[in-house]
Image: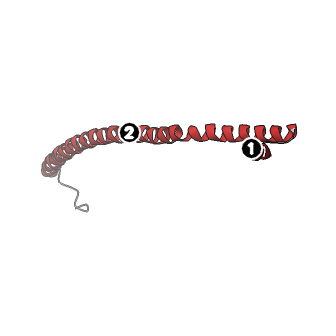
């Protein structure tokens, strides 16, 4: 029993120091106990963010695909319009040349202006 008494604190201040140390250690242990839960939550948050980014990328892909299809249709239409305008221009020039030739036959240009 004498060895047990030697290990016991001798004064109230020593006992209070031990209590404070124990309280500090208890607080640290309680903080450490929450770490696994935090460690589980961090990857879950990261996974949730990555899932949201995946959804955004998929939506962007669909939107870009739709825009590409629309642009292709617009380019096709523009090509057809350009061809039609080319035919109209050729036809117009041919008719204009015919009119000019007919006018030249009806009213020949003056002798000095050929």
Res 59 → quadrant: top left
Instruction: Mark 2 vs mark 1: give the one in front.
Output: 1
Residue at point 82% right, 37% down? Answer: 16
Residue 70 point in image, percent of width and height: 26, 39
Tag 2 near tag 1, CB within 8 Å: no
44 left or right, relative to 29 = left
- Residue that mark 1 sits on: 4
**How far, Cα to Cα, is label 2 from label 1?**
61 Å
Q: Residues within 10 Å of mark 1 (few under 14, many from 20)?
A: few
Q: Quadrant of the N terminus?
A: top right
As helix, strand or loop, the secondary structure at mark 2 comes to helix
State the residue in front, 76 or 71: 71
The label shown at residue 34 is none
41 left or right, relative to 10 = left
Residue 20 point in image, percent of width and height: 77, 39
State the residue in front, 90 or 109: 90
8 left or right, relative to 13 = left
Which residue occupies the extreme front position in the image? 1
Residue 12 point in image, percent of width and height: 86, 37
Mark sitting earlier along the chain (2/1)? 1
Number of numbered discs on residues: 2
- Residue that mark 2 sits on: 51
As helix, strand or loop, the secondary structure at mark 1 comes to helix
Colour pattern of the rendering: secondary structure
Residue at point 62% right, 37% down? Answer: 30
Res 62 → quadrant: top left
State the residue in front, 10 or 53: 10
Res 54 → quadrant: top left
Depicted 90 relative to depicted 62: above or below: below
């Amino acid at each position: 029993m004498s060895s047990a008494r030697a290990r016991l604190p001798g004064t109230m201040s020593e006992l209070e120091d031990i209590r404070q140390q124990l309280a500090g250690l208890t607080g640290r242990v309680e903080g450490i106990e929450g770490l696994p839960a935090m460690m589980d939550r961090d990857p879950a948050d990261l996974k949730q963010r990555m899932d949201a980014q995946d959804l955004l990328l998929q939506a962007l892909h669909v939107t870009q695909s739709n825009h590409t299809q629309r642009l292709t249709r617009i380019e096709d239409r523009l090509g057809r319009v350009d061809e039609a305008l080319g035919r109209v221009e050729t036809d117009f020039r041919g008719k204009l040349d015919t009119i000019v030739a007919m006018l030249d036959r009806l009213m020949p240009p003056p002798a000095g202006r050929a």
